Amino acid sequence: MGDRMTTSFPLHILDQWAGLGIDLAEHFSAGHLGDRMGITVSEASPEKVIGTLPVEGNTQPYGLLHGGASAALAETLGSVGAMLHAGPNKIAMGVDLNCTHHRAVRSGVVTGVATPVHTGRTSATYEIAITDDRGKRVCTARLTCALRPAAGQQQTGDPGAPAGPTG
């Protein structure tokens, strides 16, 4: 989708993922859905993830920002934070997302900031505050992700755990 914004990662994250042959900006992006919606992730660390979404093209029939678009932005940002917290040997899978929509937006760009509420060994929860161009809160969301071993990894102390997702 044209020029892709470069995501800023802290040095310790770059070091942690170095040598794995992974394009971090691509790996920690919104994927194909995010490309179609215009989601960009500008800053990413386990402590804070920032991204934007244009209102245009992401509206419901009344011309307002679609609640599902806010949810997609929130899940993207929270998932990126959870994946970075988990590290390269685990994957993050969203298990609960809730969104409270506070005000309507008709134009411009909304910005989401995800910050951790809980970061544990097997789960991570992020709060995502989405604001409009004027800094007014549009949506508050909370995402909880289960953290599971990546393919080929096994959790310590659980010899019967599956090696990764099965589908």
Image (spheres, rainbow, N blue to C red):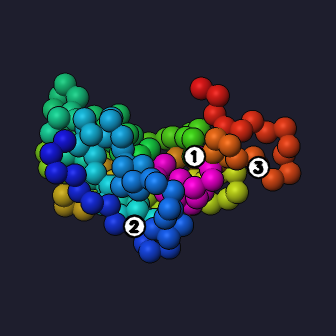
Residue 156, horizontal then vertical, whole percent? 81, 53
Q: Residue at x 27, y 40 (%)?
A: 35
Q: Are marks 3 and 2 in contact (CB under 8 Å)?
A: no
Q: Please, what secondary structure does the residue beneath circle 1 have? A: strand
Residue, disc 3: 155
Q: Is residue 105 visible?
A: no
Q: Please, what secondary structure does the residue beneath circle 2 have? A: loop
* Residue type at numbered disc 2: Phe
Q: Nearer the viewer, mark 1 or mark 3?
A: 3
Distance Cα–Cα, label 1 vs label 3: 14 Å
From the image, give the main secondary structure of the stretch colored magenta: helix
Q: In the drawing, what numbered circle is on residue 11?
A: none
Residue 167, horizontal then vertical, whole percent? 59, 26
Where 129 sits versus 68, above or below?
Answer: below
Q: Residue at x 25, y 35 (%)?
A: 36
**Residue 78 highlighted magenta (yes or no):** yes
Residue, disc 1: 92
Q: Is residue 15 left or right of residue 57?
A: right
Q: Quadrant of residue 134?
A: bottom left
Q: Which residues are magenta?
A: 77-91
Residue 68, horizontal then vertical, whole percent? 35, 34
